[in-house]
Amino acid sequence: PGRAAERFEQAETFLSQAHRGPASPFVIPETVRRSFLSTAPGPGSSLAALDKVLRRCARPESHVTPTLIAAVLANPLVEPYLDKVLGSLPLLDRLPGLEEVLTRLGNARETNSMQGALFELQAAALLCQVGYPLVEMSHLTKLPVRFRTSNGVILSGYKTFESDGLLADGTEVSFKSIWSDEHTKVLRHARQQFVKRSHGTRPAMLVVGHLPGAEFHTDWQSMANHIGAHLKVMLVDEGAGKMTKVFSGAPRKRPAPRKIPASGGRFARRSRL
C-alpha cells in the first residue's frame, strides 16, 4: 500500500503540472483516489494501467496528452469505469479524433453522456482486437450537396459530416449503445446518418451495445437496402468484453418494373371491330 500511494502521488503531481484547466487547481476526487489505492499495484491494476498510459503520452505519435488524462480523472463520474478507460487507451492512442472522445469524458456531467463516450472507447478497442482496426475516430467527411433557398433557387455546395470512426478500407463506423425502449429511434437515426455520409458509395458498419428481441434481426437487410451499401453489424457484450458479428450483407437490388407495351404492341388488346 505504501508503494501504491507513492506511485499515485507521483502521477498526481505530474498531472497537476500538466493541467491547464480553469483557475481552480487540479484535484482528483476522493472516490477516484480510493479506486486507485484499493488494489495492489500489480500488472493488472488501475495504477499500472495509468503508468502505462502516461508513459505512452510521451510518444510523438500519441494523441493522448497528460492534459486530457487530467481532465478525465478529475471527473468523479469516471470512477466506476477507470479500468475500461485506461485499458482501451493503449490500443487507440495513435488514432486522430481520440482527443474529442476524451474531452467528452472529461466534460460529462451526467451518466448518459459518460456512458456514450465510454461505449465508443470500448467498442473501438474491441474492433482493433477482432481485426477491424480503425484509422480515425470522429472522422470528418466533406461531401457535395444541393439545397434549395427560400426563393426556390437550387444551389450547389459542400457540407461536412461527422462519423464515429473510419476503417482502413473506407468503411464508415457508427457506434450506438442501444436500449430496448429506444432502439427504433436510434437505428432510424443511424440509417439516416449513413445515407447522408456515404450516399451509398462507402461500406457501413454499425456497432451496437444492446439488441432487442430476435424478431428485429431481419431488419438489418432492409437497412442495407436503404443505405445502398454493404453493411456489417457488430454486437458488443460490454460485460464480457467481447464482440460478435450479427449481420453482413450487401444491398439487394429491387427487380425492374415490368414494362407495359405501348398501344398497338404485341400484347395490346385488339378491338372487336
Image (tube, grey):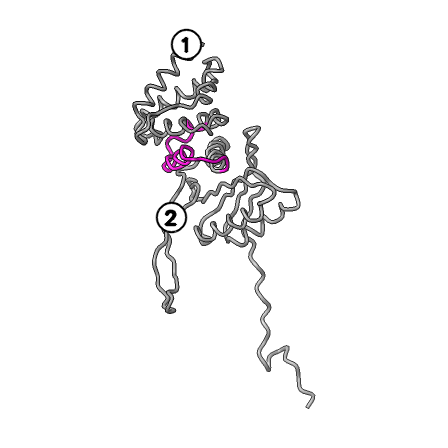
Q: Residue at the spot x=39%, y=19% of the render? A: 51
Where residue 106 sits: x, y (%)? Answer: 40, 32
Where residue 68 sits: x, y (%)? Answer: 36, 30
On screen, residue 100 versus residue 258, left or right, reads left
Task: Give the numbered dot on residue 3.
Answer: 1
Q: Residue at the spot x=41%, y=26% of the render? A: 73
**Residue situated in front as seen by the camera: 243 or 117:** 117
User: Farthest residue toward the front?
Assistant: 24
Specify the amino acid type for callout 2.
Answer: Thr
Specify the amino acid type for callout 1.
Answer: Arg
User: Farthest residue toward the top?
Assistant: 2
Quadrant location of the N terminus? top left
**Residue situated in front as seen by the camera: 240 or 258:** 240
Give the Cα separation between the discs numbered 1 and 2: 48 Å
Element assignment for label 2: strand
For marks 1 and 2, give the one nearer the viewer: 1
- Whether residue 137 is visible to the viewer of this picture, yes or no, is yes
Residue, disc 2? 141
- Whether residue 132 is visible to the viewer of this picture, yes or no, is no
**Badge 1: few (under 14), some or many (20 or more) residues near its Cα, within 10 Å?**
few
Q: Residue at the spot x=59%, y=76% of the render? A: 261
Quadrant location of the C terminus? bottom right
User: Farthest residue toward the bottom?
Assistant: 273
Residues shaded magenta:
88-112
239 versus 43 height, above or below? below
